[in-house]
Image (cartoon, helix red, strand yellow):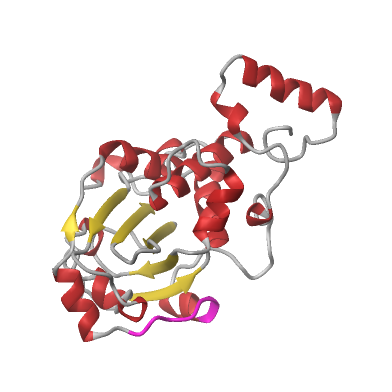
Amino acid sequence: MALIGAGAGRRALDAYAERLGELGHPLARLPRTRLDIEHRFTGRVRGLGPVKTPNQLRSRFPEVPSTDSGAVAGRRASDTRDDARAKAAVRPFTAGGWAREPEARFFTLPSPLSPDDFGMSFLKELPLRCLAGEGRRRGSAVACATTPDDVLDELFSASYHGGVNGRGQGAAYARLYAWGSLYALMGLPADVPFLEAVRQAADHRWLRFMAFTDWFHHDTSDVAFAVLDPTHTRVAVLAATDTDVDRDGLG
């Protein structure tokens, strides 16, 4: 409990967390109290299950209109490979045993992107595996504005509940992996305090998107996010998909 934000003020739990810190355990860096941005962790809200259709996405989040200038900007983006950062970004899904290897990609732009152009037309021009062949299948891609707490909750849930054929992690580790992924998406060093990360997250622009491509299973769970940094010159994309189909049949 000390490591899922329920330990502050409880002597035994605080002592346990302090001992982990003395041992250099990775869980020791977690906040002792539940931060407001974590308010949805382990919570269930009736009627708010997984988002599986464009109508569900549009009903819960404001859609971002596509623009021609967004498509032009997307074609000018440069792929910036960072394996360590990508590994941290996808950790909630790999730890939870989701069916397909998630995709985490990072891009830089030669000039600031107008926030109005950060939408589906921009994303479709990026060389993303998850969007390859978009438009060939029935159904249109959609991108909606979201918030850091929505992203963090999805990251926590992916690890905490696990994939349909995977294994859920304990709440403390799910919390650790979720924060690590959020830091990776924003490109923050690990020594940035959590509340400072929350403040910086508010200065980023966050998208949740959906596309009908062969990469996504369109089965048990599909999750996809994109984030634009405050300088409007760096973009991170994270996508994951899960299914109960036999892994041997997956590409």
Looking at the image, residue 36 sits to the left or right of residue 217; the answer is right
Which residue shows up at 41% across the image and 52% down it? Answer: 186
Looking at the image, residue 171 sits to the left or right of residue 235; the answer is right
Which residue shows up at 56% across the image and 18% down it? Answer: 24
Q: Is residue 62 magenta?
A: yes
Q: In this rendering, is residue 111 above or below 15?
A: below
Q: Residue 130's x, y, as percent?
A: 25, 59
Q: Residue furthest top?
A: 23
Looking at the image, residue 59 sits to the left or right of residue 90; the answer is right
Which corner quadrant of the image does residue 66 belong to?
bottom left
Looking at the image, residue 187 sits to the left or right of residue 69; the answer is right
Magenta-colored segment: predominant secondary structure: loop
Residue 243 at least partly seen: no
Q: Is residue 175 magenta?
A: no
Which is more toward the observer, 198 or 236?
198
Quarter of the image with the N terminus in it: top right
Q: Residue 104's x, y, as percent?
A: 30, 50
Residue 40 at least partly seen: yes
How many numbered circles are shown? 0
Which corner quadrant of the image does residue 2 belong to?
top right
Q: Residue 205's x, y, as percent?
A: 43, 67
Which corner quadrant of the image does residue 136 belong to?
bottom left
Which is more toward the observer, 162 or 125?
125
Which residue shows up at 14% across the image and 70% down it? Answer: 75
User: Which stretch is magenta?
Assistant: 59-65
Q: Residue 108's x, y, as percent?
A: 23, 58
